[in-house]
Image (tube, helix red, strand yellow):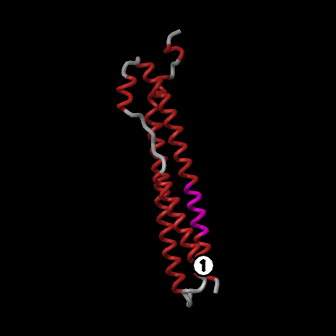
């Protein structure tokens, strides 16, 4: 049985490799944009709450523990954001490796390896995006806690 009959869709799958890389690249860029936006929101809301709180409270030294705890949560949020933004990456095929290791294969074998590599790269990039998503959730949680702590600073006498 010839390889064309046994693996009739290899050409179709090979043509789809580029679109899979593009999808993962768009997902990766989207999650990095979400991280950047969340960092901006954390910084902006913290600044606004500190300005609002300082104008609303008469005795600025009272309830300093809430400000200190809020500042710690702010730092934790920003650290989560920086780690999330800089962690992982899009895994792509290395052209040097292709030239060095796969130049001697037939067209069919080359396409088969490219499909296998694309699948591995897809899974690796997906894990990276999932890791970034978990860090975003931790960042959002610490941001909410920070807002609550700074709110207590403003509300409590």
- Report the residue marked by disc 1: 65
Q: Dot 1, how many residues are within 10 Å of its Cα: few (below 14), some (14-19), or many (20+)?
A: some
Query: Looking at the image, which residue is at 39% across and 34% down?
Result: 94
Q: Position of residue 93 (x, y in %)?
A: 41, 34
**55 vs 33: above or below:** below
Left or right? Give the position of 102 relative to 46.
left
Of residue 137 and residue 3, the one placed in the foreground of this image is: 137
Q: In which quarter of the image is residue 152?
A: bottom right
Looking at the image, which residue sits at the far right?
156
**32 vs 41: above or below:** above
Of residue 134 and residue 48, the one placed in the foreground of this image is: 134
Query: Looking at the image, which residue is at 60% across and 77% down?
Result: 66
Q: Where is residue 27 in the image (x, y as percent from the top left)?
A: 49, 47
Query: Looking at the image, which residue is at 52% across and 47% down?
Result: 129
On-image quarter of the C terminus: bottom right
**26 vs 94: above or below:** below
Q: Position of residue 81 (x, y in %)?
A: 50, 59
In the rendered image, residue 142 lying in the magenta stretch gets the answer yes
Of residue 12 and residue 92, the one placed in the foreground of this image is: 92
Q: Position of residue 148 (x, y in %)?
A: 62, 73
Of residue 3 and residue 63, the one placed in the foreground of this image is: 63
Task: Please report the bounds of the magenta region as a residue range.
Answer: 135-145
Left or right? Give the position of 151 relative to 7.
right
For label 1, the SS is: helix
């Amino acid at each position: 049985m010839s390889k064309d009959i046994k693996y009739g869709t290899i050409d179709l799958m090979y043509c789809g490799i580029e679109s899979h890389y593009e999808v993962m690249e768009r997902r990766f860029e989207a999650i990095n944009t979400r991280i950047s936006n969340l960092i901006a929101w954390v910084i902006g809301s913290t600044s606004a709450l500190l300005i609002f709180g300082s104008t609303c409270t008469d005795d600025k030294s009272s309830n300093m523990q809430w400000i200190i705890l809020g500042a710690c949560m702010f730092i934790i949020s920003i650290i989560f954001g920086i780690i999330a933004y800089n962690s992982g990456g899009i895994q792509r095929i290395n052209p040097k490796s292709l030239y060095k290791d796969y130049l001697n294969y037939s067209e069919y074998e080359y396409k088969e390896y490219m499909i296998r590599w694309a699948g591995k790269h897809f899974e690796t990039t997906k894990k990276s995006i999932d890791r970034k998503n978990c860090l975003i959730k931790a960042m959002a949680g610490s941001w909410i806690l920070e807002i609550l702590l700074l709110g207590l600073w403003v509300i409590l006498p």
